[in-house]
Amino acid sequence: MDDGHIAMELHKKGQDAADKFDYYMCGIASALFAYTAEHYVPRRFGCDFYLLDPVSIVLLLATFCFGIHRIKIGRKAINYNFLIVDADRKVKELDEMLQTPGAHRDLDGQICSRQKLEQDMAAYRSQAKAAELGFHSCRASANNTQNLRDWLLLSGFAAILFSKLLLPYVADSSSSATAASQPLHIVSPAPHPTALPFVSPPAAPASTNKTSN
């Protein structure tokens, strides 16, 4: 096995690993987005603790979108790479045909002139150059998209983590504030019963003794 074949195998394995990692990152972002959105309770927006939940949802959604965009750019770069390799192969074949004495044939097997082969070589060289420019542009865009996707995912992780870690403290402070805001009802002691004035019972009428004579 020559060095060129080994290099191609290593490049293929690296490309496959990168593709799997891109799909894996999109899977993590979509799973976290679904979990956070499922447990999200809508509230009025404000600069407080509860703003972390919608922020994490937006960050995870953006992570998924940029992850899909990164995969599309990777597919486009592979197509450009194929065009470069295919054009270089055709240029080499045409150059060998030009070096061969006798009648010349193009890539389709048709008899043609030497000038026709030279024109085809120039066209394939320009095609390879254009594809190479597109490949470098896709690679730069893919790197920028990957960095943005990773930072968005880390920010979404941080928002979820802070929302879970700060939740007990926010709940305690809310309960304390609720208890402090309730009015304090002071119950006055029951008044002592006032003594009723003593009323003496009415005197019984005097009895009259009648004596018979």
Image: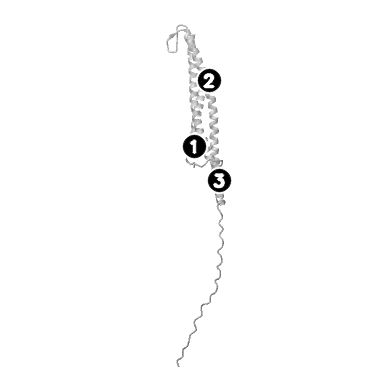
| Residue beneath the point at 54% across and 31% down | 148
* Viewer-side label of 1, 3: 3
Q: Which mark is residue 170?
A: 3
Mark earlier in primary sequence (2, 3): 2
Calculate the distance from the C-alpha at mark 1 to the C-alpha at mark 3.
23 Å
Mark earlier in primary sequence (2, 1): 1
Where in the figure is residue 142, as x and y percent of width and height?
53, 27
Question: How many neighbours does mark 2 have within 10 angstroms: few (below 14), some (14-19), or many (20 or more)?
Answer: few
Q: Secondary structure at mark 2?
A: helix
120 relative to 75, above or below:
above
40 relative to 22, above or below:
below
206 relative to 68, above or below:
below
Where in the figure is residue 32, as x and y percent of width and height?
49, 37
Total labels: the figure holds: 3
| Residue beneath the point at 48% across and 27% down | 72
Where in the figure is residue 185, as x and y percent of width and height?
55, 56
Residue linked to disc 1: 33
| Residue beneath the point at 55% across and 45% down | 170
Q: Secondary structure at mark 3?
A: helix
| Residue beneath the point at 49% across and 37% down | 33
Image quarter where the C terminus lies is: bottom left
* Tag 1: amino acid: Phe
Q: Secondary structure at mark 1?
A: helix
Q: Residue furthest top?
A: 102
* Tag 3: amino acid: Val
Residue linked to disc 2: 133
Question: How many neighbours does mark 1 have within 10 angstroms: few (below 14), some (14-19), or many (20 or more)?
Answer: many
* Tag 2: amino acid: Leu
